[in-house]
Each structure stands twice: as C-alpha cells, then as structure tokens.
Amino acid sequence: KAGVTQTPRYLIKTRGQQVTLSCSPISGHRSVSWYQQTPGQGLQFLFEYFSETQRNKGNFPGRFSGRQFSNSRSEMNVSTLELGDSALYLCASSYVRGKDTQYFGPGTRLTVL
Amino acid sequence: TQLLEQSPQFLSIQEGENLTVYCNSSSVFSSLQWYRQEPGEGPVLLVTVVTGGEVKKLKRLTFQFGDARKDSSLHITAAQPGDTGLYLCAGSLSGGYNKLIFGAGTRLAVHP
C-alpha cells in the first residue's frame, strides 16, 4: 500500500506571497493532520481534517488554513507569507480518529525569502 | 513550556553502547508514539503504546509506557551506526484525537 504523499517536496516563495501544499493520505485513511516543524519550535500541530471537516486546530494565525476533499486528499494554504513560515510542513494520515496511529508523509520544505 | 519533556536532547555514543531516552509529562496520555526521523524526511513510526505499564520490544529497541500513562522511555541495546537519527516521542491527550503533542526530540549519533 502506498504511503502518504506530499507535493511539492520543495518550495521557495517570497514574503507576502501565498502557497498551497497538497497531501494524499494512505488509501482508506480518512483523517489528515498537518504539522509544522522548525528547528526552534519542533513539531507543532496545525489542524486535522476528517470527513471534509476541520475537527481540531492548533495555535496558529488565521493565515494558515486547510481543506479536505471527498477523496480524503487535503490541502493547506498559507497566505501573506512571513520569513518565520519557513519550515518543513508534514502531513499525517490515519484510518479513523482517536487512538489510531498516524503515518507521516515526507514533508514539503518551504523556504520564504 | 513543553507539555512533553524529552531528554536528553543530544546523545553521542560509540557503537555497542546502550542508551535510554525519556519522555515525561504531568499530563495523562491516551496513547504515546515513538518516531524516528531522518534529515529532510517525515517521521517514521517505531511503536505505539496505549496501556499503562506496557512494554514493547522491537529487535534491540525496548519501549515502556509508564503505569500512570504520563511518561515513556526508549532503550536501545548495543547501538549501531544505523540507529543514528532524531528520535521523537508524541502523545495523544484524551479527547485530543489526532492532535499529537511532540517532544523536542533526541538527536542520536552512534559512532563506529
């Protein structure tokens, strides 16, 4: 079974621009969560989507948003990029919510110049 | 303040040595997961523990979940250079569903 895929793998943007990242979960998985990883803050939860609805949200500004499609694929969007948004953005999927294990994709490395 | 305190932050050892990584919290977790991450890649799941007092073994790796489900440890026996990487613990709070709380990570270097 194919793992979690994320596109693109690398992205360079400038301040003020917006960006959209994509995540395809493992086949059959319905929950998709997004995380931001930086050297200073480590891995931090952004949000979780299940059945096309945002179920949980981390402590990030409204510039960070996401959505999930009927096939469980998910996108996250960051508007008005700031230098501090440079990070590895990770997507994780699980079959259901709760104690089910999350499996991570390889991430998208975003660099904001 | 980290909700999940992971220690040590860095570990540099010789091949064949044993080591233990700790994750501690004042909060109770419904489950706890250990991941290993290579540079530029996503975390790869090593194990999930859900029951207080649970011990799981994966070859030379032994994982323990505390009785009160507030702490966990990862013990590696006879470390090898291939064990080098970033080890992360992550917990799920009751009712937190798929919102994982991560420790800061332990960067392990095993030298031949």
Image (cartoon, coloured by chain):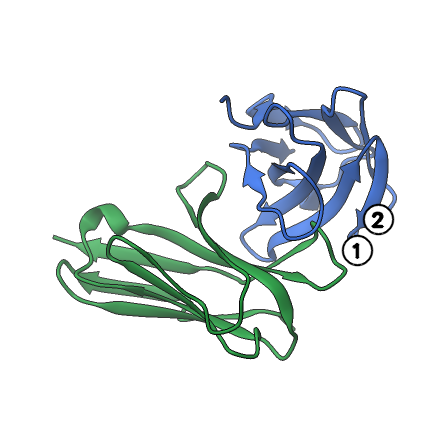
Chain colours: A blue, B green
Q: Secondary structure at mark 2?
A: loop
Q: Chain of mark 2?
A: A
Q: Which chain is indicated by disc 1?
A: A
Quadrant of residue B54 within the rendered picture: bottom left
**Mark linked to residue B106:** none
What residue is at 58 percent from the left and 76 percent from the top? B25
Q: Is residue B58 left or right of residue B38?
A: left
Task: Say the numbered circle drawn on residue A61.
Answer: 2
Query: B93 or A64: which is nearer to us?
Result: B93
- Above-or-below relation of A110 to B10: above
Q: Residue B46 location in percent, x, y? A: 41, 49
Picture residue at 24% right of the left edge, 57% below the top: B60
Cα–Cα gap, marks 2 and 1: 7 Å
Circle 1: element type: loop
On screen, residue B48 above or below B93: above
As drawn, the label of residue A59 is 1
User: Few, some or many C-alpha atoms within 10 Å of disc 2 (few <14, some 14-19, many ≥20)?
Assistant: few
On-image quarter of the N terminus of chain B: bottom right
Q: Quadrant of residue B102?
A: bottom right
Q: Amino acid at mark 1?
A: Asn
Residue A93 pos. (x, y %): 63, 36
Q: Residue sitting at 57 percent across and 79 percent down?
A: B68
Q: Is residue A65 above or below residue B1?
A: above
